[in-house]
């Protein structure tokens, strides 16, 4: 089984179009979308419409929740969120509400956005220094919270990375389709950047297809 893994599109329909065109040339048995899909100031509705044309296995991210859980005061103070909600309409909101937090694709393959228990926590990176540093093997295994899958696909950090743990698990973050760099204030002020403007996704091949 060949899996294409996408994450963190952030309403960048142009980057998504490029990724879809590329993965069609490469071929995949299944395409997974790891969340943070429509939050961004580019083209939320067009991104949604393009995704509806494709049969992707999709989970939600923290900023998908931010859109449909936003309070009136949060919307009033956030021009980007106002634009997103005005552009989307009701149908995409209902779709996002229905997305699962995580997904067991097969016995061997598990999907999450952040960690198996928290979509706001980076699974592979510590950002206490203000930029991304790889967590220790012990920290990563602890954050897996007993998830036993051989292959774990995660997003959230916008940083493409592959880690093989001492528990003999492969963790793959495909990076970001639509937002290669950002600064956030939580849990501390930090910047994440891929050092490339290119859209990023991962292609994984020769996987067992047991379920």
Image: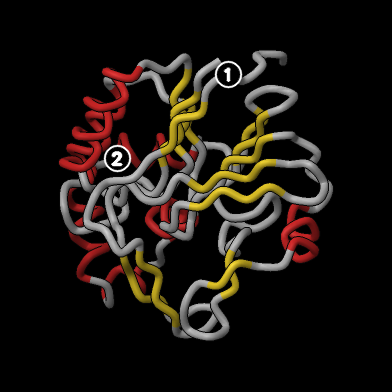
Compare residues 88 and 24 and report the one nearer the observer.
Answer: 24
Element at label 2: helix
Specify the quadrant of the image occupied by residue 102.
top right
Where residue 97 sits in the image (x, y, percent)?
Answer: 47, 41
Placement of the N terminus among the 4 image quadrants = top right
Upstream in sequence: badge 1 or badge 2: 2
Where residue 206 sits in the image (x, y, percent)?
Answer: 58, 18
In-image side of 141 versus 1 (left or right): right
Please give the name of the residue rendered at 58% of the width and 63% of the height, measured from the top-left corner. Answer: 122
Q: Could you give the CA–CA distance between mark 1 and mark 2, rounded to whole angstroms?
A: 40 Å
Q: Residues within 10 Å of mark 1 (few under 14, many from 20)?
A: few
In-image side of 83 versus 141 (left or right): left
Placement of the C terminus among the 4 image quadrants = top right
Vertical position of residue 144 compared to residue 53: above or below: below
Please give the name of the residue rendered at 19% of the width and 41% of the height, measured from the top-left corner. Answer: 13
Vertical position of residue 114 compared to residue 49: above or below: below
Tell me the number on the disc at residue 2.
Answer: none
- Label 1, on which residue? 206
Please give the name of the residue rendered at 35% of the width and 61% of the height, measured from the top-left corner. Answer: 194
Please give the name of the residue rendered at 29% of the width and 18% of the height, measured from the top-left corner. Answer: 24
Residue 73 seen in this snapshot: no
In-image side of 10 versus 123 (left or right): left
Q: Residues within 10 Å of mark 2 (few under 14, many from 20)?
A: few
Residue 135 seen in this snapshot: yes
**Label 1 vs label 2, nearer the camera:** 1
Where residue 201 sits in the image (x, y, percent)?
Answer: 38, 40
Compare residues 191 and 161 and report the one nearer the observer.
Answer: 161
Q: How is the image coloured?
A: secondary structure
Element at label 1: loop
- Label 2, on which residue? 90
* Pointer 1 with pointer 2, Cβ within 8 A: no
Specify the quadrant of the image occupied by residue 50.
top left
């Amino acid at each position: 089984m060949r899996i294409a893994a996408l994450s963190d599109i952030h309403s960048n329909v142009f980057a998504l179009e490029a990724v879809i065109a590329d993965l069609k040339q490469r071929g995949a048995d299944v395409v997974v979308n790891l969340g943070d899909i429509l939050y961004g100031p580019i083209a939320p509705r067009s991104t949604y419409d393009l995704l509806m044309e494709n049969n992707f296995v999709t989970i939600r991210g923290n900023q998908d929740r931010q859109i449909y859980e936003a309070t009136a005061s949060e919307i009033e103070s956030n021009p980007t969120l106002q634009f997103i909600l005005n552009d989307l309409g009701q149908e995409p909101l209902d779709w996002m509400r229905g997305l699962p937090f995580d997904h067991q694709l097969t016995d061997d393959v598990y999907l999450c956005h952040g960690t198996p228990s928290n979509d706001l926590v980076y699974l592979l990176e510590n950002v206490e220094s203000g930029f991304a540093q790889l967590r220790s093997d012990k920290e990563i295994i602890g954050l897996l919270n007993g998830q036993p899958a051989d292959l774990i696909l995660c997003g959230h950090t916008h940083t493409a990375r592959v880690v093989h743990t001492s528990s003999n698990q492969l963790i793959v973050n495909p990076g970001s389709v639509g937002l290669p760099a950002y600064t956030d204030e939580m849990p501390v002020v930090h910047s994440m950047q891929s050092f490339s403007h290119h859209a990023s996704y991962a292609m994984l091949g020769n996987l067992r297809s047991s379920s």
